[in-house]
Image (spheres, coloured by chain):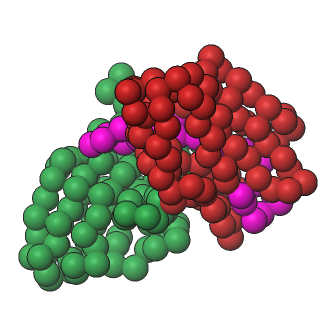
Chain colours: A red, B green
Amino acid sequence: GENVEQHPSTLSVQEGDSAVIKCTYSDSASNYFPWYKQELGKGPQLIIDIRSNVGEKKDQRIAVTLNKTAKHFSLHITETQPEDSAVYFCAANDYKLSFGAGTTVTVRA
Amino acid sequence: NAGVTQTPKFQVLKTGQSMTLQCAQDMNHEYMSWYRQDPGMGLRLIHYSVGAGITDQGEVPNGYNVSRSTTEDFPLRLLSAAPSQTSVYFCASRSDWSQETQYFGPGTRLLVL
């Protein structure tokens, strides 16, 4: 089955700086790569996703890039704000979603 | 729409007790699934269902049972609780197996003593 690795496990950034989270996957058949944000005490919520026929997608301050050849994809958050503090999960879909271990992002004011 | 709802929010069990975690969705989604979340391990799939009457095992199914008698409900049963089942459990749904956007419930925090 699919194996998704996510780095780093924790990330602390100064407000206004950028944050980057990287994930790798193992199954070349995976064709859908979502990113979820989980705030304390809540369920994960989809924030952006990318499909295998697209190399990059942007939505305001967040962007995701995909390198199919290298089997890795990344989440980029620009101009970070305190409300960006949360746990972020990447996932890869080869019919069943497989999740990375998560990255705890802390934005320092 | 209420989306995906889960009950209870929090539960304490003693080793060997059984219980059912409830999950319901009002979006007429065919595909539903259960995950457990443990520190440093992300979300691991326990069981999933592609429609009423159809269920299958995920990555970590041992100690859990599911059934899907209606489109709306997908309960998760712990047959004989063990401390290793202490975790946060999330139910999720999406419109069907081919559609990717998945919606999660708020979670049930389970402590097994």
Q: Where on the picture, by quarter, is residue B14?
A: bottom left
A28 to A60, vertically: above or below: below
- Quadrant holding the C terminus of chain B: bottom left
Residue B89 placement (x, y as % from top left): 32, 57
Q: Nearer the viewer, residue B40 or B88?
A: B40
Q: Residue at x 30, y 58 (%)?
A: B88
As drawn, is B22 to the left or to the right of A92? Answer: left
Magenta-span inclusion, residue B39: no
User: Residue A49: horizontal and vertical position, in percent?
Assistant: 66, 35
Q: x, y percentage for residue A1?
A: 68, 70
In this picture, which residue range is highlighted in magenta? A24-46
Name above or below for residue B82 compared with residue A93: below
Image quadrant occupied by the N terminus of chain B: top left
Q: Can residue B6 be seen in this snapshot?
A: yes
Q: Determine the residue positioned at 86% across, 56% down.
A: A70
Does the segment drawn in magenta span residue A40?
Answer: yes
Q: Residue at x 50, y 57 (%)?
A: A9
Q: Is residue A26 left or right of residue B87?
A: right
Residue furthest out toward the right:
A69
The answer to whether residue B53 is seen in the rendering is no
Toward the viewer: B56 or A37?
A37
Q: Is residue A26 left or right of residue A22?
A: right
Q: Is residue A44 left or right of residue B56?
A: left
Q: Residue at x 43, y 34 (%)?
A: A107
- Please determine whether, in this image, residue A80 is positioned above or below residue B9: above
* B49, above or below B72, in the image: below
In terms of image quadrants, where is residue A79? top right
State the residue lying farthest toward the top. A60
